[in-house]
Image: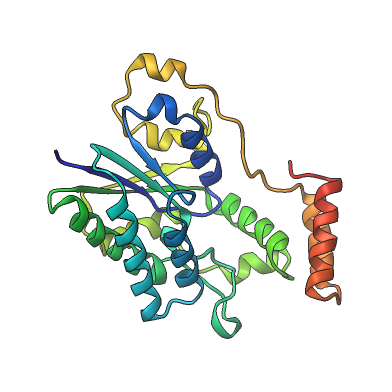
């Protein structure tokens, strides 16, 4: 049996939460056609990916390799395997790395991680294993706005959106970034799915995976419509996060203020 692996490697803020939630929530229907794994199935690998993304030292990519090898050794052979985790590309641009430097792009971490995963997959499933990478994408402005909103909520981001956009003015769009990464990997196929295109599908962003499978029409009709997940906060809440981040508050107090704000006015 030749194993086909579809590794959904990101990017962040491109419908990944919706995709992962939908696939996991419909495994009873999908299990005959794929074996699906995400962070819940490989917590040690997920932790190693996150650590390397923020601190990309050589010894930490070795930790990713060990965690990937250990995880793959524990799962059974299957005809089609789907792995999904946005940190297969590293950390989200805008987060801080060592000594406060900004993570400014994906390739620095995505290429080493991708090489490790391709090697580990072919070692586990044999040299004829078909390794395919899937990247979900998003238009540049919408993506930057989503990233900025996430960082306002998650860390002490003090840039306005205009300032944040200027910091990343030279950042290539996600399509070009994915193609650049793939040029450095030995892949059998590269799949790119624009969020604006797949969101109209009943399965939402998960359609980017389902469209790569040979699903019977009867199964497609049984799949429920996808709810939206991880929707960014509205502009008023984003503006308040920015004000709080710029205020002179300690980390604990800042988190408490943000949590209170989210409870009063949930995302949407």
**Occupied quadrant, residue 265:** top right
Locate residue 87, reporting x and y percent. Answer: 46, 59
What sort of colour scheme is used for the picture? rainbow
Number of numbered discs present? Answer: 0
Q: Is residue 36 left or right of residue 162?
A: left
- Image vertical order of residue 183 relative to residue 78, above or below: below
Foreground of the two, 262 or 65: 65
Locate residue 94, reporting x and y percent. Answer: 59, 68
The residue drawn where x is 62% and y is 64% is 165
* Quadrant, the C terminus: top right
- Image vertical order of residue 81 relative to residue 201, above or below: below
Q: Is residue 245 left or right of residue 130?
A: right
**Occupied quadrant, residue 169:** bottom right
Q: Residue furthest bottom?
A: 99
- Image vertical order of residue 190 relative to residue 227, above or below: below
Foreground of the two, 158 or 223: 223
The residue drawn where x is 80% and y is 70% is 252
Foreground of the two, 226 or 140: 226
Q: Is residue 153 left or right of residue 12?
A: right
* Quadrant, the N terminus: top left
Locate residue 217, reporting x and y percent. Answer: 35, 16
Locate residue 53, reporting x and y percent. Answer: 47, 69
The residue drawn where x is 39% and y is 18% is 219
Q: Residue furthest front?
A: 74
Foreground of the two, 229 or 241: 229
**Occupied quadrant, residue 225:** top right
């Amino acid at each position: 049996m030749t194993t086909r692996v579809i590794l959904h490697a990101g990017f962040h803020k491109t419908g990944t939460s919706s995709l992962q939630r939908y696939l996991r929530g419909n495994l009873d229907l999908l299990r005959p056609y794929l074996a699906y794994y995400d962070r819940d199935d490989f917590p040690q690998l997920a932790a190693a990916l996150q650590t390397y993304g923020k601190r990309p030292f050589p010894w930490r990519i070795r930790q990713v390799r060990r965690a990937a090898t250990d995880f793959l050794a524990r799962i059974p052979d299957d005809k089609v395997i789907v792995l999904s985790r946005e940190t297969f590309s590293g950390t989200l641009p805008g987060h801080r790395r060592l000594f406060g430097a900004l993570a400014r792009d994906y390739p620095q971490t995505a290429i080493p991680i991708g090489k490790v995963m391709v090697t580990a997959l072919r070692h586990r499933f044999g040299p004829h294993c078909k390794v395919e990478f899937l990247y979900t994408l998003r238009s540049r402005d919408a993506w930057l706005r989503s990233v900025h909103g996430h960082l306002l909520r998650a860390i002490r981001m003090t840039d306005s959106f205009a300032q944040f956009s200027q910091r990343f003015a030279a950042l290539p769009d996600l399509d070009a970034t994915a193609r650049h990464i793939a040029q450095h990997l030995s892949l059998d196929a590269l799949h790119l799915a624009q969020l604006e295109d797949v969101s109209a599908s009943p399965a939402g962003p998960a359609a980017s995976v389902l469209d790569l499978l040979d699903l019977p029409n009867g199964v497609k009709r049984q799949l429920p419509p996808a709810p939206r997940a991880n929707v960014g906060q509205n502009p008023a809440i984003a503006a308040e996060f920015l004000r709080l981040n710029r205020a002179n508050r300690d980390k604990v107090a800042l988190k408490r203020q943000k949590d209170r704000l989210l409870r009063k006015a949930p995302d949407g």
